[in-house]
Amino acid sequence: MEHAEVLGTLTEFIREKVLDSAGMEVAPDTPLLEWGILNSLSTTALVVFINERLGVDVPAERMVGRNFRDLNSVTRLVLELAADARESEMGTL
């Protein structure tokens, strides 16, 4: 997975499934929590989407504000968790 690919996938999800206003744009640095775009329900939906679409499990201890501040933060989290999972798999081989 590459940064641009993950960012694009997450951006599409937020636009299509979370934003109420058609035409409202979200940028990589849009403050998702501060602007109320992400709340407990939409964050849970995003975490489920990340698991189902990207195959990355977000553990409860990583579901903190700094990881969901904006799309850049969420993208970094997904890439970190994916890398950790790959390293863990390599260690078990």
Image (cartoon, rainbow, N blue to C red):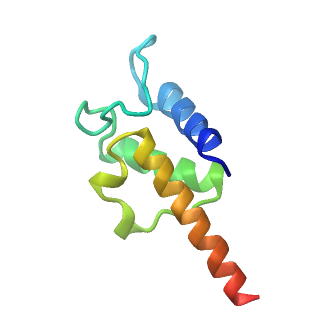
In this rendering, position of residue 32 left or right of residue 19: left
Point 30% across, 53% down: residue: 66
Hey, which quadrant is residue 39 in on the image?
A: top left
x and y percent of residue 37 in the render? Answer: 33, 32
Hey, which quadrant is residue 57 in on the image?
A: bottom right
Point 53% across, 26% down: residue: 16
x and y percent of residue 20 in the render? Answer: 39, 21
Give above or below for 66 relative to 34: below
The total of numbered circles placed on residues is 0
Point 69% across, 79% down: residue: 89
Position of the C terminus, as image quadrant, is: bottom right
Hey, which quadrant is residue 59 in on the image?
A: bottom left
Of 48 and 15, the residue lying toward us? 15
Give above or below for 64 relative to 5: below
x and y percent of residue 30 in the render? Answer: 35, 30
Of 70 and 21, the residue lying toward us? 70
In this rendering, position of residue 72 left or right of residue 39: right
In this rendering, position of residue 71 left or right of residue 57: left
x and y percent of residue 42 in the render? Answer: 39, 41
**Residue placed farthest to the right in the image?**
93
Point 56% across, 51% down: residue: 50
